[in-house]
Amino acid sequence: MGRNPVTWLGSPAFPSAARDALGDMQLRGNLAHATSTIRTKRTAAVEELPDWEHLRLAGAAIKDDVLSNLDGYLERLEAAVTARGGVVHWARDAAEANEIVLRLVQEAGASEVVKVKSMATAEIGLNEALAAGGVSAIETDLAELIVQLGDDRPSHILVPAIHRNRSEIRDIFRGRMSDVDGLSDRPADLAEAARAHLRRKFLSAKVAVSGANFAVADTGSVVVVESEGNGRMCLTLPETLITVMGIEKLVPTWSDLEVFLQLLPRSSTAERMNPYTSVWTGVTPGDGPQRFHLVLLDNGRTKTLADRVGRQALRCIRCSACLNVCPVYERTGGQAYGSVYPGPIGAILTPQLGAGTDDPETAALLKSLPFASSLCGACYEVCPVRIDIPTVLVHLRGKAVEGTHTPESVAMAAASWMMRSPARFRLAQRAASVLRLVARRGRVKRLPWPGSKWTDSRDLPAPPAETFSAWWRRTRG
């Protein structure tokens, strides 16, 4: 994972990765089908609730309250977890979190762990860190398992293998699983093969590692929602349970949790409620894991919190609704973002979590991500906690070019100088009329540098035969 585990080692800047992805027609077809299906279902699920906008407002308000009083809520959570037999660990960064988890696994005498899908553990590169310490991590979410067995990278927050079709999945299973030589690509057969493969792991695992969708500060309860039941197996069968949770995942009370258990399923899977909602509070003698460890992960979150505009990214509840409506994501896929957090939310969250890296490749990727958007605003419209992603994107773009001279900044400075003088403005209009000589069907499709920075990715409308000012003087003068 490199010096900054929030990004993938060696990932190029977004424009380069996106250009390669655009040439993959199979990828584009898979994404277009999947995202359009999810969008349609989500719209129907949301329209069932007449108070949907009030729920969005409530979700945003609760999250903002948590972010404004995070220190107090975290201390309250620690006290509640400890009182119920759990142990809380604080991790400043990825390296510290990985060291804590590896040590706990080794103390439990395990050489293998089963995992509930967790973006936080992917963010810190936990699987790689465990492997370096001699521990195998087995992903039990079906999509995560597909990614793991295919030596692949996730491309979606909710459906990490969204870029794979069922024939590709069949081939991955045939290559990496035993006793599946005649496996077909029927979804039921693929699911049964995964079930048989994982059942042996569930029954033998001593340690499980989970993420957390939410944690209730008042009671110390941790919540995981999922659709397959694999999480329930991980959270009940092993002797030791280790949860890695970003410090922003808190809600103050159970009544606050109620709001998010309505917002999340409709925004993510387009369901009224998740099929499996698992809640545990510390340790219960004789029932479930008898050792519970909660690792509270910072890894750039407190730095993000200090940015009054960018901090709203920490409201995110990882629903993926913004990915499913994003025209850029739909055409490039999630791997082009070079991070476990793809799409619009990744374009604002990843650069903030990874800020300050001294690795040039990572820095170039982080700097490019806020520009991976058309600023259409669809992401803000569907966000269940009202993250104003376009505003944060523009804010981060400003920070990315601060103190630098880019073609855009030079062009804007020249335009400002030209527009301050009516005479210069009229002269510029006359000069621009020469573009009509290279226009075809009303569009200028190719210009030499620096104009190519525009025409490489979009057409330029040809100037009109007569400017508005000239028309006004001719008809009103």
Image (tube, rainbow, N blue to C red):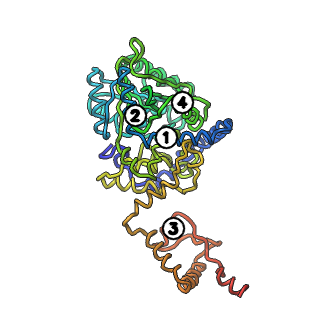
Q: CA distance from mark 3 to mark 2?
A: 42 Å
Q: Nearer the viewer, residue 221 or 392?
A: 221
Q: Is residue 417 left or right of residue 134?
A: right
The residue at 43%/22% (across/down) is 281
Asked if labels 1 and 4 touch by Cβ distance under 8 angstroms, the answer is: no
Q: Is residue 200 above or below residue 267?
A: above
Reading the chain from its start, which is encountered first: label 3 or label 2? Answer: 2
Q: Which residue is mark 3?
A: 454
Q: Amino acid at mark 3?
A: Trp
Q: Which residue is mark 4?
A: 255
Q: Amino acid at mark 4?
A: Ser
**Mark 2 nearby-residue class (10 Å; few <14, some 14–19, many ≥20):** many
Q: Position of residue 136 (x, y in %)?
A: 33, 28
Q: Position of residue 299 (x, y in %)?
A: 34, 42
Q: Which residue is mark 2?
A: 245
Q: Amino acid at mark 1?
A: Lys
Q: Residue furthest right?
A: 475
Q: Nearer the viewer, residue 364 or 107?
A: 107
Asked if labels 3 and 1 touch by Cβ distance under 8 angstroms, the answer is: no
**What secondary structure is marked by label 4?**
helix
Q: CA distance from mark 4 to mark 1?
A: 13 Å
**Labels 3, 4: front one:** 4
Q: Is residue 206 visible?
A: no
Q: Which residue is mark 1?
A: 63
Reading the chain from its start, which is encountered first: label 2 or label 1? Answer: 1
**Labels 2, 4: front one:** 4
